[in-house]
Amino acid sequence: MSTKLLEQIGLTEEQAKVYSCLVSLGTLQARKIALNTHINRSLVYKVLKQLVVLGLVTETTNPRSVSTFTGLH
């Protein structure tokens, strides 16, 4: 998915990169999103929270595991 198009419809550059990564690669942990987008992991968590509020990403939490995130199509 084109990050430039996502930016044109109102997402920030970081939001566009994270969302595009999730749509392309599927469900991922924040650490893997950071590796694929080259965005600092702490910023990735902030961006993921923003995308959850926007309804573009869902978070799956498991008490015995790390949270995973999925981009909604």
Image: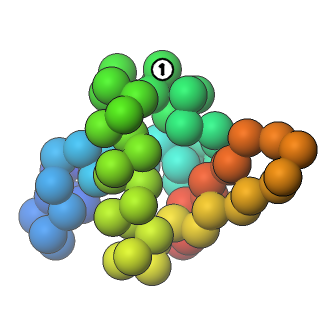
Residue found 65% across the figure and 41% down from its top: 28
* Side of 31 where 60 appears, left or right: right
* Side of 1 where 73 appears, left or right: right
Residue found 36% across the figure and 34% down from its top: 42
Q: Residue 57 in the image: x percent, y percent?
A: 51, 66
Answer whether residue 27 is visible to the viewer in this image: no
Locate the C terminus by quadrant. Answer: bottom right
In the rendered image, the vertical position of residue 39 relative to residue 29, given as above or below: above
For badge 1, the amino acid type reads Leu
Q: On the image, numbered disc 1 is attached to which residue?
A: 35
Q: Residue 41 in the image: x percent, y percent?
A: 41, 29
Name the secondary structure under disc 1. helix
How crowded pointer 1 is (Cα within 10 Å; few <14, some 14-19, many 20+) is rated as: few
Q: Residue 9 in the image: x percent, y percent?
A: 16, 71
Residue found 82% across the figure and 54% down from its top: 62
* Side of 70 where 1 appears, left or right: left
